[in-house]
Amino acid sequence: MLRRTWLVFSQAVTVALGGLFVVETLKPEWLPRSAPVLPGPTIVQASAPAASAPGGVHAGGYSAAARRATPAVVSIVATKMARGNPHADDPRFRFFFGDEAARQRAQTGLGSGVIVSPEGYLLTNNHVIEGADEIEVQLADGRQVRARVIGADPETDLAVLKIDLDKLPIVAFGDAPSLQVGDVVLAIGNPFNVGQTVTAGIVSALGRNQLGLSTFENFIQTDAAINPGNSGGALVDVAGNLVGINTAIFSRSGGSMGIGFAIPVDTARQVMEAIVREGRVTRGWIGVEPRDLTPEIAQSLGLRVVSGVLITGVLQDGPASRGGLKPGDVVVRIGDAEVGNTTELMSAVAALKPRSEAVIGVQRGERALDVRLVIGERPAAMRRTPR
């Protein structure tokens, strides 16, 4: 009995194995299979959109900020008309130098700008449009229009333009004073005329001055790539708000080397409002020749202060002269604001209204005294060409 049972079991197993072999060979899809386990990283599929970082920036990119700001950034083509050579009609000039020398071609400059109001006001750099006879503006949506100059301020290298179009995109003003070194920023413009470009970087430094780019300098330094053609474009924060106007680069090759400079938006806004309201920017002036006070100079003059601005010259019959300021005085305070170098002195005086009265704290030898001045208006100055 046991032998018969074993034979039946053996035959059943044999038949089953034979059937399994036939199915495996002819119909393998009939058999259930488990996924093979392979070596590699574990991939977790997100079940919801990535969380937003502060300022509305999605983790992994700044596309929201770019979408918000780029429509308001424009390309600017500034053209200076050809000027005829005064000797163009002289046959001898044409004989020696040729007809081509007698003709002067129009010069074209490229830059960028930022639309900051629905009325069509644009901010850009003065050096982008300076001396131009025609200014053409191209919007990101493809529209082109002529722009007119409302005013310019060479001492901060800013200019205000206006275009007349409907439904203009604008960029919101950000809070430049709240910027900190290390904050992420985006630079938007039209470098090398390749078309609108967005680059990202961080704020590398704040309050950069004494660069020889303009008279009043308080630049934001960034490593976001800024190249020729970016001048006048936007520097925005991670929320897409305007924090600066791109102005210049430090470069030995003509391209970006990771050091770019932008004018803070609070300065740009003050200049724009003054130009729109009055047609120009007025600044305070006292008529002195200042120099930074060093410890060596302070010691040689026997001064009790080691910080301030030494007055080396006073303009005859100027505001400082009429108020009693003298060469050798050290200015330590303008109103309630302490000044430690010439940049701070110039900025503090420029912020005063012409014809207003101000008290200037002075160290004269061993004496500390207050000098009361009536502030004059700063004369127009020649602009320095950005490098």
Image (tube, helix red, strand yellow):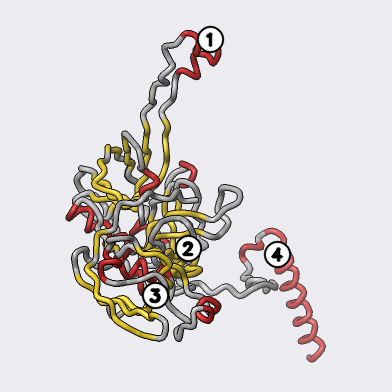
Q: Amino acid at mark 2?
A: Gln
Judged by depth in the image, the label closer to the viewer, 3 or 4, is: 3
Which residue is located at x 46 percent, y 65 percent?
209
How far apart marks 1 and 4 lie (CA) works out to 96 Å
Q: Residue at x 50, y 17 (%)?
A: 100
Q: Nearer the viewer, mark 2 or mark 3?
A: 3
Residue 210 circle label: 2
Q: CA distance from mark 2 to mark 3?
A: 23 Å
What residue appears at the point 37 percent right and 34 percent down from the top-left corner? 79
Q: Is residue 351 left or right of residue 255?
A: left
Residue 40 location, x and y as percent? 67, 72
In what element is the residue under mark 2?
Answer: loop
Classify mark 4: helix, strand or loop: helix
- Please name the residue shown 45% across and 80% down the image: 307
- Kindly identify the amino acid type of the residue bearing the numbered disc 1: Phe
The disc, 3 or 4, on the residue closer to the chain's N-terminal end is 4
- The residue beneath circle 4 is 24
Q: Nearer the viewer, residue 385 or 24?
A: 385
Residue 329: numbered disc: 3
Query: What's the distance in space between the residues labelled 4 and 2, CA to CA?
Result: 83 Å
Is disc 3 in contact with disc 4, using a CB cutoff of under 8 Å?
no
- Depth-wise, is mark 3 or mark 1 nearer the camera? 3
Q: What percent of the width, then of the height, locates residue 191?
A: 47, 47
| Mark linked to residue 95 | 1
In the rendered image, the quadrant that contains the N terminus is: bottom right
* Cα distance in 3D space between marks 3 and 4: 103 Å
